[in-house]
Amino acid sequence: MLLAERVLLSLRHRTRELSLGVCEARKLAALAAEWLRRGVSAGDLRLALSSSLPVEGVRTAFGFLEHRLREKLPAPPAETADLVVAAGSAPPPPLPLIACDGPGEEHMFRPHASWVTTCGPCHREERRAYWADVQARAEADPQPPPPPWRERVAAEAGAGGGGGEASGASGYGTRATATYMPLCS
């Protein structure tokens, strides 16, 4: 109960609206201690009590905190104990050994997932071979670098009306970027 009382008294440092006297904090300490018994940390309790305060302000800190301690009380530990038991059950058995589909001599490995068909070293070797092939093809048939954006824009403007600013067409909304739709039929 001492920790619960300290948490309640520390709320004044968070916001002045939640200042409690020692006697008021002792009256609310039993409710706050129940939160701590249910597994809520002191910091989480402080945050739950001091966050999302009403816009119009708090009239009485004691009444507000008593209401919040009762209304936001977390589920009792008996309900959460079933979840802990289920989570604490035995881990699933490991996947069986399978033959590696990778290059080289046939060997067995234990996959980390059911869809894996190659061991780690073979998978890395396949990836290295793939990217070496991609790089070799790129070096054998080099593509010319694309022209700079200014040249592409100038070429587009030249093809769109033969003169850009002089013909009245430039940038967005030009014939090159917009389609003509009649207003009425």
Image (cartoon, helix red, strand yellow):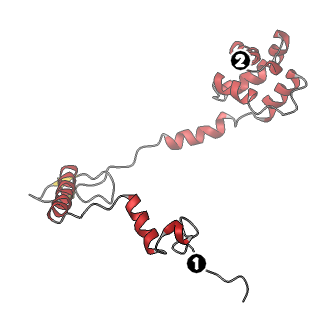
If the image is split into quadrants, where does the C terminus sit? Answer: bottom right
Count of all numbered marks drawn on residues in the image: 2
Q: In the image, what residue occupies the spot 80% across and 18% down?
A: 16
Query: Is residue 22 placed above or below 179 in the rendered structure?
Result: above
Task: Report which residue position mark 1 lands on.
Answer: 179
- Residue lying farthest to the top in this orientation: 22
Residue 7: assigned label: 2
Task: Name the one closer to the observer, 69 or 141.
Answer: 141
Q: Secondary structure at mark 1?
A: loop
Inter-mark Cα distance, 2 to 1: 67 Å
**In the picture, residue 3 is in which quadrant?**
top right
Residue 125 visible in this rendered orientation of the protein:
yes
Left or right side of 33 for 60: right
Evaluate if marks 2 and 1 touch, with contact meaning CB atoms under 8 Å apart: no
Query: Is residue 41 placed above or below 119 in the rendered structure?
Result: above
Identified by mark 2, the residue type is Val
Q: Give how far across and how far down residue 142 sits, in percent.
A: 19, 63
- Residue lying farthest to the front in this orientation: 166
Q: Give how far across and how far down residue 140 sits, in percent.
A: 14, 64
Q: Residues within 10 Å of mark 1 (few under 14, many from 20)?
A: few
Residue 87: assigned label: none
Task: Name the one closer to the observer, 138 or 33.
Answer: 138
Q: In the image, what residue occupies the spot 75% across and 27% down?
A: 49
Left or right side of 74 for 83: left
Q: Give how far across and how far down residue 66 sits, in percent.
A: 84, 26
**In the picture, residue 178 is in which quadrant?**
bottom right
Identified by mark 1, the residue type is Thr
Q: In the image, what residue occupies the spot 43% across and 71% down?
A: 158
Q: Secondary structure at mark 2?
A: helix
Query: From the viewer's perspective, is the residue at label 2 or at label 1 nearer?
Result: 1
Q: Residues within 10 Å of mark 2 (few under 14, many from 20)?
A: many
Which of disc 1 and disc 2 is earlier in sequence? 2
